[in-house]
Image: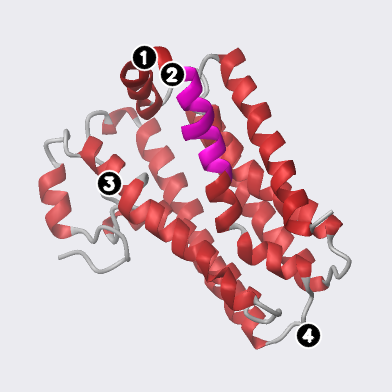
Amino acid sequence: MNYFLSLAIVLFIYMTLWFFVSLIRKRNDVADVAWGLGFVLMTWVSFILSDDSSLRGLLTGALVSIWGLRLAWHIHARNKGKQEDYRYLAWRKQWGKWFYVRSYFQVFLLQGVLLFVIILPVLLINMRSGPGLGWLDAVGIAVWLFGFYFEAVGDAQLRRFLKNPTNKGKLMQEGLWAYTRHPNYFGEVTQWWGIWIVALSVPSGLLGVLGPITITFLIVKVSGIPMLEKKMEEHPDFAEYKKRTSVFIPKPRK
């Protein structure tokens, strides 16, 4: 069976299973946990299906696994014991009787399609090994590490800030959050650009640019920053924070 068709079928089954999990749990935000784990699954399934696996594929698999497993665990721990994420709660009210149908197509299957596009650099790496590891791989890994630092440390700083009772009602503006209003989003996007740089060493790797372009657009213009900033605008300190701090790319505070 065709390499990409086989992967698409696996991803379709995976997202459908998570839809049933959401029905059992009665919360659609399980899709956020499924997101990171889906990348890990697709990475290793593509590695196994490939007839030309390589050290580059193993290395990329390790990077994606570290990112995906950390993200899934972080979201699970953040949501545990709390009500469903505010975005999904809003959709429950908006979609009414069509909630379950729209959830399946607009949350789970659409997420699967986007996942398939974003992970394209990894699929291309696993499809054809290309030459041995070289300077492009080193640059890509360095970019990935830079991004991982921003995402993991940014999340950890926010988690500690929120756990401190003295910060109740305050807006996080410390650590990496003093240089960008969304260090975790910046880190996530940067990691995928790093993986694409690694993919440039393999045949057709240039086409993998669709992956980082897609995740960048989604986070900066669609479901990431815009939705979160709309919620942050409710905080009285946000207007001043917005004036002094870069929205995405880290910069010294004004």
Q: Which mark is residue 131?
A: 4
Query: How far, Cα to Cα, is label 4 from label 1?
Result: 54 Å
What residue is disc 1 on? 96
Q: Position of residue 180 (x, y in %)?
A: 30, 58
Q: Which residues are magenta?
A: 100-112
Foreground of the two, 154 or 97: 97
Cα distance in 3D space between marks 2 and 3: 23 Å
**Would residue 69 be seen by someone viewing this image from the given angle?**
no
Marks 3 and 1 sit apart, C-alpha to C-alpha, by: 24 Å
Distance between mark 2 and mark 4 Cα atoms: 49 Å
Amino acid at the residue labelled 2: Phe
2 and 1 marks in contact (CB < 8 Å): yes
From the image, give the main secondary structure of the stretch colored magenta.
helix
Residue 102 appears left or right of 7: left
- Tell me the element at label 1: helix
Check residue 107 for magenta coloring.
yes
Identify residue for label 3.
Answer: 226
